[in-house]
Image (cartoon, grey):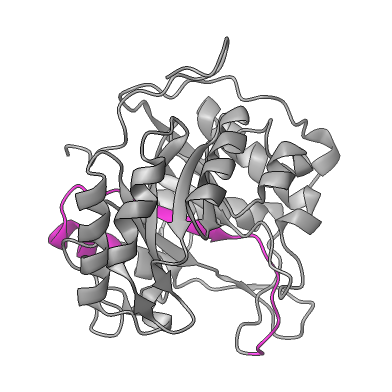
Amino acid sequence: MTFGPGRRSYGPLLRAPDGADNAGAMAHTHRPRSLRAGLLVAAILVAGSLAGAGSAAAVTPYSRTAPMILQGPSPEDLAANKNGICTGNFTHVIRNVGGAASAKTYLDVAAKCDLKVILFFSTTADHSTGVVYPTRVAPLVNAVKAHPALFGYMSVKEPSWVGITAWEIRTLYKAYKAADPAHPVVGLWGDIPHFGMSVNPYTAGMADIVMVGWYPVETTTGTNTIYLTTGPTHFKRVRSVVAAATPGRPIWLLAQTHKYLKPATHKKQRPSQSLLSRQVREAFVYLGAKGIGFHTWSNVNYTIDQRRDPTMVAWMNDLARRIQAGTFQ
């Protein structure tokens, strides 16, 4: 389906593959690209030292058509092109919806922005109680699965934190695939130091796309910035677990853009532009990431989020533009 002249044409849905900061200088121009069947892979020589790379230079392999994913913009913010998100270089958006009507409304608005939507139906998995409702999946899916802006579904978000079990994750996945075998199911895992262990399980039959959240930018004082260097180690382990359990499954990163100081154990500090790029670079090198998400558009409990931070969104947009141009370094 093509969304008018000059818009990108969507081919087959995603399948497992075979084998000094200056926001003012970053214009919010429309993305000049097309997502076509097949991946064009760029290998960029990155100067400088990566954590754990062991050399002054490392090769960063990535796809120029890798999804660039927003998390949670409201339909009103999409329609208003808040911070340039509708006319930028983003390609996908994740959105929580309560029912079919709100899902259809969101899909319609996203289509006008040329964004593909990953829907999370909040009534199918209660992340406050850890209870899942697979029988609710089919009616919701049946109402939206023919919409041209639909990319797929998100079944669970960081299930280990709320006690959603491996069996429950598989049960939800089975329900989504029974209702709509044509669209992929994305699962989002947190706590990646324990990914694949009994406390944070990953097995076959859970997701078509594995998304992991890793937020390494922290503070010890509320104002200074430290960067957790254990990410590459965790990324390599996640990659090996996924490859062993589900060979060929693509992995996406959900990168940190926010600041969040409560509870004190979080201590998340807002990344600089260079640290945003570092997160993505490490994901490409060590995780083998096939898509990049940005956390998060809006959360009133956070000290800062993307909605209140147009500079961060400009950095995200520029990063996406460089990836799509094959010039990410």
Seen from the viewer's position, the closer of residues 166 and 248 is 166
Seen from the viewer's position, the closer of residues 72 and 105 is 105
* Quadrant including the N terminus: top left
Left/right placement of residue 29 relative to residue 114 reads: right
Instruction: Identify which residue is drawn at 43% across, 38% down.
Output: 150
Given the current orientation, which residue lies at the most extreme bottom position? 264
Q: Is residue 257 magenta?
A: yes
Quarter-wise, where is residue 142 in the image?
A: top left
Q: Does the magenta stretch include residue 309?
A: no
Residue 93 vertical placement versus 267 (above, below)? above
Q: Is residue 290 visible?
A: no
Q: Where is residue 300 in the image (x, y as percent from the top left)?
A: 74, 70
* Quadrant including the C terminus: top right
Left/right placement of residue 294 relative to residue 313 reads: left
Instruction: Identify which residue is drawn at 41% across, 42% down.
Output: 144
Given the current orientation, which residue lies at the most extreme right position? 24
Instruction: Identify which residue is drawn at 72% across, 37% down.
Output: 79
How many marks the image carries: the answer is: 0
Quarter-wise, where is residue 13 in the image?
A: top left
Q: Position of residue 166 (x, y in %)?
A: 23, 76
Q: Where is residue 51 in the image (x, y as percent from the top left)?
A: 48, 63
Residue 140 vertical placement versus 245 (above, below)? above
Seen from the viewer's position, the closer of residues 54 and 66 is 66
Seen from the viewer's position, the closer of residues 298 and 256 is 298
Instruction: Identify which residue is drawn at 46% across, 51% down.
Output: 119
Q: Can residue 130 be seen in this view?
A: yes
Q: Position of residue 247 (x, y in %)?
A: 15, 52
Specify start and end residues of the magenta stretch as a single range. 238-264
Given the current orientation, which residue lies at the most extreme top position? 5
